Amino acid sequence: MALTETVPAAPAHEGILRRQSLRESAARTYARSLPIVPVRARGLTIEGADGRRYLDCLSGAGTLALGHNHPVVLEAIRTVLDSGAPLHVLDLATPVKDAFTTELFATLPRELAEKARIQFCGPAGTDAVEAAFKLVRTATGRDGLMAFSGAYHGMTAEALAASGGAQHSSVVRLPYPYDYRCPFGTGGERGAELAARWTQSLLDDHKSGVPHPAGMILEPVQGEGGVIPAPDSWLRRMREITAARQIPLIVDEVQTGVGRTGAFWAVDHSGIVPDVIVLSKAIGGSLPLAVIVYREELDSWQPGAHAGTFRGNQLAMAAGAATLAYVRANGLDRRAGELGARMLTRLDSLAAAHDCIGEVRGRGLMLGVELVDRDADADATGARPADPGLAAAVRDACLDRGLIVELGGRHSAVVRLLPPLTITDEQADAILDRLADALTAAVSTTPGPTGSSPTTMRGTTP
Ligand code: PMP
């Protein structure tokens, strides 16, 4: 994409940022750590109003499966605009919606799709999470929910209650199999098995104090929680445990869906079939769209039980159907798996060279680098305390080098990479080159949390 004279000059960029900080809420998030003013974008690249270009590895928090402004997405949107179709239709039937639903059902696990219902929700992922909870509560007549430590399901009341940072009396928190910081001190398959057993014992011990829940919600790979892939064996155990006890299993694929993890849906890796699947982000092809798809036996709620004005975004459905079809036709899920594995190998080499990397991990093009206190002793499982200060310095150094990344994890110490599934091998290398350079620079200028002086590469430290 060529720079042209239409790009506003730097003073305009500064004015926009200044007015934003004066006028927008203190709750603004990404805008704080990424002081850029995007004016144009294509694929992996964003161009700022200051004329700088950035490689965008945040991708709208994992939304942009095809990157920014992919031609098939733009074409789908233009087709709807040019057709004269109404843009606002509440939840009425339209050809655009019909085509989206057909395309979506074609991608879902067959056992679910064959007997599924779809509910179009308000436009955000959190709306679909709320709908899922309401659905299982109505269907089971029970109230409580089971959710996992470190989870993130959104910011509306119930979704937040099921997320890791919250406390809520109707949500029972279960251990998620976090290998690097295993709550049972063992890690590996053993740690995951112990986590599963704990869940099972809470459900089966009538003195556990945990009432039989309306449902269990989990992410197959925790995203905001720090890019933590659950082992497939553990996911199968959760499926068995819930199925045997008539507990609907809700799988939140808001971030993992549409090829991101190397399979079309992350559940495809383990072969589990959820009772409810929560979808948003990439299914709207960069525009707001959220749905739940669920087993038809659960469809016992009343007409209007989950209404909402904005459930019929025609442009999002068209963009989403085009995205789903493009990912499917071009095997981008497979490509994400292969490229992600190669990137992980390079990240492993980076970890071998830097004491400050506790672990690199991920699945497909959902990758994370956990930064830790390079001077602290490892605990019995080999984990060291998180280093959020260094992570923030790495993020800033990445931005200086034209790479957009964000942080996640319990302590905001995990640098996350969520590039579009369409990136080339050369772009993947450019991302990792910039990250490696940023890491070296941040390590050399940032003291460790325990106050030690900056250190350098492993092996070269005195
Ligand atoms: N679930 C998961 C797994 C997510 O990652 C997110 C957003 N990061 C949400 C739900 C909430 O989606 P939204 O921000 O669109 O409400």
Image (spheres, grey):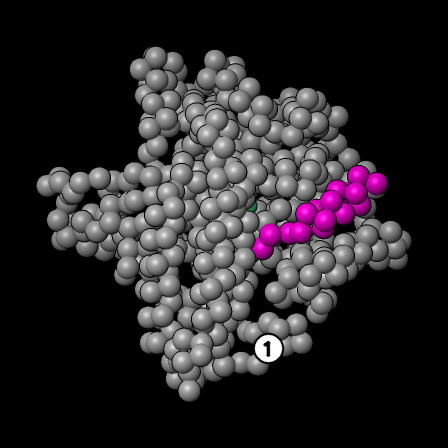
Residue at 34% over, 23% down: 75
Residue type of the residue flagged with mark 1 = Ala
Residue in view at x 10 percent, y 41 percent: 5
Tag 1's secondary structure?
loop
Left or right side of 269 for 46: left
Rendering coords of residue 30 (x, y %): 38, 53
Vertical comparison of 440 with 310: above or below: below
Q: Position of residue 427 (x, y in %)?
A: 34, 48
Q: Main secondary structure of the magenta part?
A: helix
Q: Position of residue 384 (x, y in %)?
A: 56, 74
Is there any visible trace of residue 119 in the rendered image? no
Going by the picture, which residue comes out furthest to the left? 5
Residue shown at 39%/78% (left/top)? 456
84 sits to left or right of 346: left
**8 vs 51, nearest the viewer:** 51
Residue 235 part of the magenta-drawn span: yes
Establish if 413 lies above or below 326. Answer: below
- The residue positioned 72% from the left and 58% from the top of the image is 189
Residue holding disc 1:
378
Front residue of this view, candidates 166 and 67: 67
- Point out residue 4 in the picture as x, y percentages from the top left corner: 13, 40
Q: Quadrant of the N terminus?
A: top left
Residue 68 visible in rendering: yes
Query: In the rendered structure, which segment of residues is drawn in magenta?
Result: 228-244
- Mark 1 closeness class: few <14, some 14–19, many ≥20 residues within 10 Å: some
